[in-house]
Amino acid sequence: QVQLVESGGGLVQAGGSLRLSCAASGRDFSNYALAWFRRAPEKEREFVAAISLSDEKTYYADSVKGRFTISGDKGENTVYLQMNSLKPEDTAVYYCASGPFSHATPTQEYYQYYRYSYWGQGTQVTVSS
């Protein structure tokens, strides 16, 4: 049974930092990508960042580029999201997701929630002003 378990959310002041973790288990993830999405109250689910575990290529939403860093530990099937310079608009539930991607997958596919087969339960991130 595939499981994605997130941790690391919490309350932080604007300008602060948090580090989210997601541990994946239950299958071989070597040809999978691990990603973070978020959903703020009354807003659509939004892509944040993704990393391909096969070649470690990373992908970011424009809104977090330069502030957030995604990294992965292929051996542990774990992905991290280091979030710096947090803003109140980063407040959301953050979800870890995973799906199969090949080297031929177009870049824009990494940004699409429907490409991800497995989802975690989410972790709340709240940034106060």
Image: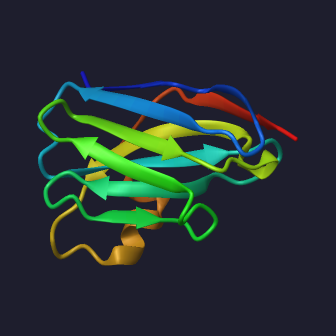
Quadrant assignment, res 44: bottom right
Q: Position of residue 72 (x, y in %)?
A: 27, 44
The colouring scheme, among rainbow, by chain, secondary structure or one colour, is: rainbow
In depth, the one of 15 and 22 nearer the eye is 15
In depth, the one of 67 and 104 nearer the eye is 67
Quadrant assignment, res 127: top right
Q: Position of residue 107 (x, y in %)?
A: 34, 76
Q: Position of residue 52 (x, y in %)?
A: 25, 57
Q: Residue at x 57, y 57 (%)?
A: 67
Q: Position of residue 59 (x, y in %)?
A: 40, 65
Q: Residue at x 28, y 30 (%)?
A: 24
Q: Left of 57 or right of it: where is 36?
A: right
Q: Quadrant of the N terminus?
A: top left
Quadrant assignment, res 13: top right
In depth, the one of 1 and 23 nearer the eye is 23
Q: Left of 2 or right of it: where is 41?
A: right
